[in-house]
Image (cartoon, helix red, strand yellow):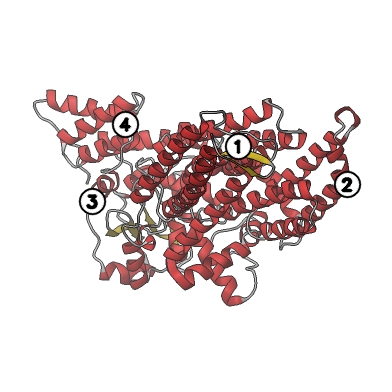
């Protein structure tokens, strides 16, 4: 006879009791392993690329901390600013910047890495708790998927607070809708108030609240009469309205709601936004950056999308959830920046209604046990792989490749105005302010200045609105002219040179090639034959050229100019470990200009194998073929 015992008004036989005991023992192990794994994973970089935005956030936080007020004008650049963008950039992140700087001041980059792990683990924990109604296995597996999915967008920036606050906001709304507790009302107002002072993503949060209210109101209408929705609609509307009102308590007031429209409507701003990775649409982002992490992320996103869609089609979600998820889905397709918020909010509202268990039926006891053991094994193995092998501060993505260049500039004062690339500008702000002020950085405070910098680095002959097309045309033309040995002394009348004069540029700090694509910047080829520009520094990651004028007499005296043909060696060192068609094309060109025909041919063929439309790589092969068939070969050595 099978013994039975009564639990909560129902009978449970001995096997069920054993299974329940086993699961009660193993569940804490599974949950602990899940969050230990995610915590360790977020301590380290998730890709080989480095996100340098943290540098200007830290420096802004330092200024606020020391001066006890928000900057009224940008202290980091010497070029003109756009008043609207300047106001948004300097004031919309102030509290996040202060927190980031405080953590960095106390514990360095290791502290920032721990802060990131804590924020993201708390975000995933909110999702895990909301999904428990779907069953333990569903909540663990989907939380693990979410944790890995948002890794490519987990750089240490204020947007981490947006992920956290989005999860907290929707969870509080769901809880208040179910229980109508005053603590949820207060919590929601506090969350939105903090969010509005940390990151501009609070605008998305305010939009979610309005859509959520609209959905609850629709559910309360007579055709869809839902007594619970009708009862909660008015107090929920008051609560959401108070939370939205709290977002107006910030240094910008309500102006960000209007300024954000200009960001996407003004043609110049739209052109800039189209170039920022996190502002790109989902499909353009995949085409632009087809690396493994992005593809993995998209696969994971697809799984979450399917899960969310299943909940919607089975009518487990009402109008509030449906409107919220669909709106965020559309925003995610327009801008990948919103993807993590969509995943977090979508999963929380999916877990808020009904019950669904992965395992059910008479055979579920055995299956549950096996699944639990398998889950512990997988999580344990992954956690072991993520155990620390070095200090997180040593490996965090803010560890810059520009340290030697920064030390050189710090020890040796170069006078006058600097021309720099935007990502390098972030590091210079962090390392060298107030000794140096930059031309531009990734805040893009003035869109015209940003594109003027590109027009100079790509040596554009005449001003144009067709930016990307003319950049590639200029790169091709300059490279092929140099390959043919054409004289370029007439460049003094070209647009890029007039910009150098306009901004009174005295020295140039930058990479010879684009940090991501590996494309060669034509400006360096142009300046090779200009005796008024002297190469005084190169280290494989950055070069410094100075204008030969009275401001730089001392630095030129202390550092005798180097042969500018070394810029080709610099291009090779910057690209030798990159694997992309444009990087291979640059390597082919640089090797050819250094007289290494064999490597030039190898890399030109590799480039064309990946992209048959690369004109410079094709020109390199044609030149090599002509030299091989000539009885008196002439090499395109510089100078």
Q: Residue reaching furthest right?
A: 222
Mark 4 vs mark 2: give the one in front.
2
Q: Nearer the viewer, residue 633 or 17?
A: 17
- The residue wearing badge 3 is 566
Q: Secondary structure at mark 2?
A: helix
Q: CA distance from mark 2 to mark 3?
A: 72 Å
Dot 3 or dot 4: first in sequence order is: 3
- The residue wearing badge 1 is 332
- The residue wearing badge 2 is 234
Q: CA distance from mark 4 to mark 2?
A: 66 Å
Q: Is residue 536 above or below residue 383?
A: below
Q: Residue at x 78, y 50 (%)?
A: 179
- Estimate how packed mark 3 is, as few (under 14), some (14 to 19) or many (20 or more) residues with alpha carbons within 10 Å: some
- The residue wearing badge 4 is 616
Q: Position of residue 90 (x, y in %)?
A: 62, 61
Q: Quadrant of residue 359?
A: top right
Q: Residue at x 45, y 58 (%)?
A: 425
Residue 590 appears left or right of 125: left
Q: CA distance from mark 3 to mark 1?
A: 45 Å
């Amino acid at each position: 006879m099978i013994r039975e015992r009564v639990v909560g008004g129902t009978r449970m036989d001995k096997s069920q009791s054993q299974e329940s005991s086993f699961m009660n023992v193993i569940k804490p192990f599974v949950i602990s392993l899940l969050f230990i794994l995610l915590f360790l994973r977020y301590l380290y970089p998730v890709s080989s690329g480095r996100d340098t935005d943290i540098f200007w956030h830290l420096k802004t936080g330092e200024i606020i901390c020391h001066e006890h007020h928000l900057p009224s004008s940008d202290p980091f650049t010497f070029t003109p600013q756009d008043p609207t963008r300047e106001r948004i950039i300097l004031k919309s992140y102030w509290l996040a910047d202060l927190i980031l700087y405080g953590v960095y001041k106390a514990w360095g980059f290791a502290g920032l890495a721990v802060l990131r792990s804590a924020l993201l683990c708390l975000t995933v924990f909110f999702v895990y708790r909301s999904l428990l109604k779907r069953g333990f296995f569903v909540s663990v597996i989907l939380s693990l998927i979410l944790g890995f999915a948002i890794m490519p967008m987990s750089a240490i920036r204020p947007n981490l607070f947006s992920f956290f606050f989005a999860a907290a906001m929707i969870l509080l709304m769901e809880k208040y809708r179910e229980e109508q507790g005053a603590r949820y009302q207060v919590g929601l107002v506090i969350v939105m108030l903090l969010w509005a002072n940390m990151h501009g993503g609070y605008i998305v949060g305010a939009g979610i609240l309005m859509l959520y209210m609209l959905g609850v109101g629709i559910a309360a209408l007579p055709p869809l009469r839902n007594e619970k929705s009708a009862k909660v609609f008015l107090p929920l509307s008051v609560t959401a309205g108070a939370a939205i009102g709290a977002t107006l308590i910030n240094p910008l007031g309500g102006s960000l709601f209007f300024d954000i429209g200009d960001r996407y409507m003004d043609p110049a701003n739209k052109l800039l936004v189209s170039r920022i990775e996190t502002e790109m649409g989902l499909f353009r982002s995949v085409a632009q950056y087809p690396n493994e992490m992005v593809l993995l992320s998209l696969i994971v996103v697809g799984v979450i999308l399917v899960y969310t869609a299943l909940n919607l089609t089975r009518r487990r979600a009402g109008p509030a959830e449906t409107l919220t998820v669909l709106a965020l889905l559309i925003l995610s397709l327009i801008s990948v920046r919103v993807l993590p918020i969509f995943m977090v909010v979508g999963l929380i509202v999916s877990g808020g209604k009904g019950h669904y268990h992965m395992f059910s039926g008479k055979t579920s006891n055995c299956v549950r046990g096996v699944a639990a053991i398998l889950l512990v094994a997988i999580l344990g193995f992954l956690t072991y792989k993520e155990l620390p092998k070095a200090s997180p501060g040593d490996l965090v993505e803010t560890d810059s490749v520009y340290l030697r260049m920064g030390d050189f500039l710090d020890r040796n004062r170069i006078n006058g105005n600097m021309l720099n690339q935007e990502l390098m500008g972030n590091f210079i702000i962090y390392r060298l302010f107030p000794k140096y002020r930059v031309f531009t950085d990734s805040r893009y405070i003035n869109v015209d200045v940003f594109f003027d910098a590109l027009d100079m680095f790509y040596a554009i002959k005449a001003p144009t609105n067709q930016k990307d097309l003319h950049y590639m045309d200029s790169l091709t033309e300059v490279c092929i002219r140099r390959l043919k040995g054409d004289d370029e002394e007439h460049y003094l009348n070209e647009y890029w040179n007039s910009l150098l004069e306009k901004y009174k540029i005295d020295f140039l700090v930058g990479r010879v090639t684009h940090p991501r694509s590996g494309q060669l910047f034509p400006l360096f080829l142009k300046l090779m034959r200009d005796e008024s520009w002297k190469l005084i520094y190169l280290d494989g990651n950055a070069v410094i050229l100075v204008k030969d004028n009275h401001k730089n007499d001392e630095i030129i005296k202390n550092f005798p100019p180097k042969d500018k043909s070394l810029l080709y060696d610099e291009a090779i060192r910057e690209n030798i470990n990159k694997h992309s068609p444009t990087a291979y094309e640059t390597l082919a060109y640089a090797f050819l200009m250094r007289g290494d025909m064999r490597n030039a041919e190898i890399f030109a063929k590799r480039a064309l194998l990946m992209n048959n439309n690369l004109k410079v790589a094709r020109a390199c092969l044609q030149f090599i073929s002509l030299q091989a068939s000539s009885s008196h070969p002439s090499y395109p050595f510089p100078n």
